[in-house]
Image (cartoon, rainbow, N blue to C red):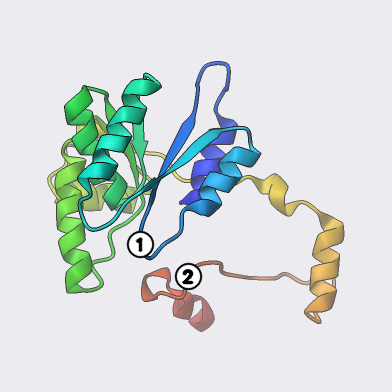
């Protein structure tokens, strides 16, 4: 999600859009990477300390930022930010949109979080699905098709065009130049399907 966010922010016309990042600092997951990347790109970014499932102090801080900077659109990317964003949207009247990446339903705790998340999606003015399958899962959760827009994630191919670096990496891994290479990047989680790639 962080790479997708940075690609989107860097691709937006900065003369038309004033982009700012507010990252919820969760207890177990650091959000400093996206904040640092945004700062390096000249984008104002802040971390909002956030503890527990619903931290009203974090909600108030987010509301203050929205009002202080006269934010006109909230764009949220994952369940917790959608919950906080939906609350702040209701408090301020600022429209909320979201990019929905997936629901995994991999265990009971995850299914409960995703049930609440589906409720939050009903309050979003627009919900971007990163694939047709994700859009279909949203429709199964009774989210109106009029709210859903399918926009596949874009990839900045320039990041992979350095032939000298490619040659050096191949050599360091004992690969012959010119041979096709297939790889998979993602966390080691069953929902990423690494075993399907190995089997294929």
Nearest to the observer: residue 36 or residue 194: 36
- In the image, what residue occupies the spot 26% across and 72% down? 106
Side of 36 relative to 49 (left or right): right
x and y percentages locating residue 133 in the rendered image: 31, 53
Residue closest to the far front: 57
> Which percent across, then down, holds residue 6?
55, 42
Q: Quadrant of residue 98?
A: top left
Q: Are marks 1 and 2 in contact (CB under 8 Å)?
A: no
The residue lying at 37 percent from left, 19 percent from top is: 70
Q: Quick check: 55 above or below 112?
A: above
Residue on which the image places disc 1: 27
The crowd level at tag 2 (other Cα within 10 Å; few <14, some 14-19, many 20+) is few
From the image, tell me which residue sits under label 2.
187
In the rendered image, is residue 58 in sight? Answer: yes
Foreground mark, 1 or 2? Answer: 1
Quadrant housing residue 156: top right
Whichever of labels 1 and 2 marks the residue nearer the N terminus, that label is 1
Residue at the image position 50 percent from the left and 37 percent from the top:
45
Frontmost residue, 180 versus 147: 147
Asked which secondary structure carries label 1, the reply is: loop
Q: Is residue 60 left or right of residue 176?
A: left
How crowded pointer 1 is (Cα within 10 Å; few <14, some 14-19, many 20+) is rated as: few
| Residue 170 locus on image (x, y percent) | 80, 72
Instruction: Using the image as rendered, state which of residue 135 and residue 93 is in the foreground.
Output: 93
How many numbered dots are placed on residues in this image?
Answer: 2
Q: Is residue 140 left or right of residue 41?
A: left
Secondary element type, mark 2: loop
Placement of 157 over or under 13, stated as above or below: below
Marks 1 and 2 sit apart, C-alpha to C-alpha, by 19 Å
* Above or below, comparing residue 21 to residue 181 in the picture: above
**Extreme residue toward the top, this view:** 15
């Amino acid at each position: 999600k962080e790479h997708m966010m940075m690609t989107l922010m860097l691709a937006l016309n900065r003369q038309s859009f004033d982009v700012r990042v507010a990252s919820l600092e969760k207890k177990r997951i650091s959000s400093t990477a996206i904040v640092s990347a945004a700062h390096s790109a000249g984008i104002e970014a802040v971390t909002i300390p956030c503890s527990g499932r619903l931290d009203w102090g974090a909600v108030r801080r987010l509301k203050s930022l929205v009002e202080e900077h006269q934010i006109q659109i909230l764009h949220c990317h994952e369940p917790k930010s959608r919950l906080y964003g939906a609350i702040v949207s209701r408090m301020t009247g600022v429209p909320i949109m979201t990019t929905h990446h997936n629901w995994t339903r991999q265990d009971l705790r995850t299914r409960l979080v995703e049930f609440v998340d589906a409720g939050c999606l009903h309050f979003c003015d627009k919900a971007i699905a990163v694939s047709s399958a994700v859009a279909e899962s949203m429709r199964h959760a009774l989210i109106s098709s009029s709210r859903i827009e399918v926009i596949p994630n874009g990839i900045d191919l320039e990041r992979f065009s350095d032939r000298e670096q490619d040659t050096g990496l191949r050599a360091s891994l004992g690969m012959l130049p010119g041979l096709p290479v297939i790889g998979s990047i993602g966390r080691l989680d069953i929902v990423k399907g690494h075993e399907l790639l190995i089997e294929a």
